[in-house]
Amino acid sequence: MPDPALSDALAEAAALAPADEIIHHTLEIRHPAFVDDAGNADSIWVVQGTEELMAPIEASAPVRGGQVVRFVAFAFTFQLMPIEPGTTPEIELTIDAVNRELVEHIDAAVASAVPIVVIYRPFLDSSIEDGPQMDPAPSFQLSDVHVSVTSVKAKARTGIDLRGSFPRRNYTPADFPGLIGS
């Protein structure tokens, strides 16, 4: 997965935190079990907050690419897990005050062997029409999904395994005889 690039506008908004600029944090929850009324592939689209958001997504998105989508308002949080040697870096995702439709969709996805994918897209309120402020949008695979009547909790992983040495290649005398002094 390529590194997501922050737009200059998002980097400025994050660094300066101007009072008049709002960053809308959105998630696309994608799974083959999610289809629209016509049977076409669809996703669950959520925005952090109390008001829905209509916003265009990047043209390269596999579901509704280049279209304006409706993000439904939900309370959700990402919590970074501690990074310790030998562990896989993860994020804990919690979506609170879920509705019955969301619970049914997530339950159906969890029952299948295909992983649930979550894509994070931030939008600036001053330039929603420009699309998401990260390209490509970072994606995560959900694991350890727990669904209750009021919330969905899961761990999210990027698919990048950071366990092990860096750089990945080990420079050994067998491969590089010049490492041994004469």
Image (tube, grey):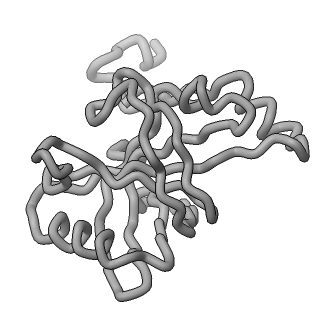
Residue 44 drawn at (x, y percent) = 34, 55
The residue that appears at 79% across and 36% down in the rendered structure is: 13
Res 79 quadrant in image: bottom right
Residue occupying image coordinates x 56% and y 48%? 53
Above or below — where is 125 with respect to 36?
above
Q: Quadrant of the N terminus?
A: top left
Residue name at image x 48 percent, y 67 percent: 92
**Left or right of 79, for residue 163:** left
Residue 23 visible from this viewpoint: yes
Image location (x, y in percent) of residue 7: 65, 24
Among all residues in the image, which is located at the extreme bottom? Answer: 149
Tell me which corner region of the image, top left, top right, bottom left or bottom right, holds residue 170: top left
Quadrant assignment, res 131: top right
Front-most of 81 and 43? 43
In the image, residue 92 above or below residue 19: below
Task: Name the image quarter holding the C terminus.
Answer: top left
Q: Is residue 114 above or below residue 23?
A: below
**Residue 153, image x, y percentages:** 41, 75
Is residue 166 something that shows in the picture?
no
Q: Residue at x 25, y 56 (%)?
A: 116
Q: Residue furthest front?
A: 37
Q: Nearer the viewer, residue 173 or 28?
A: 28
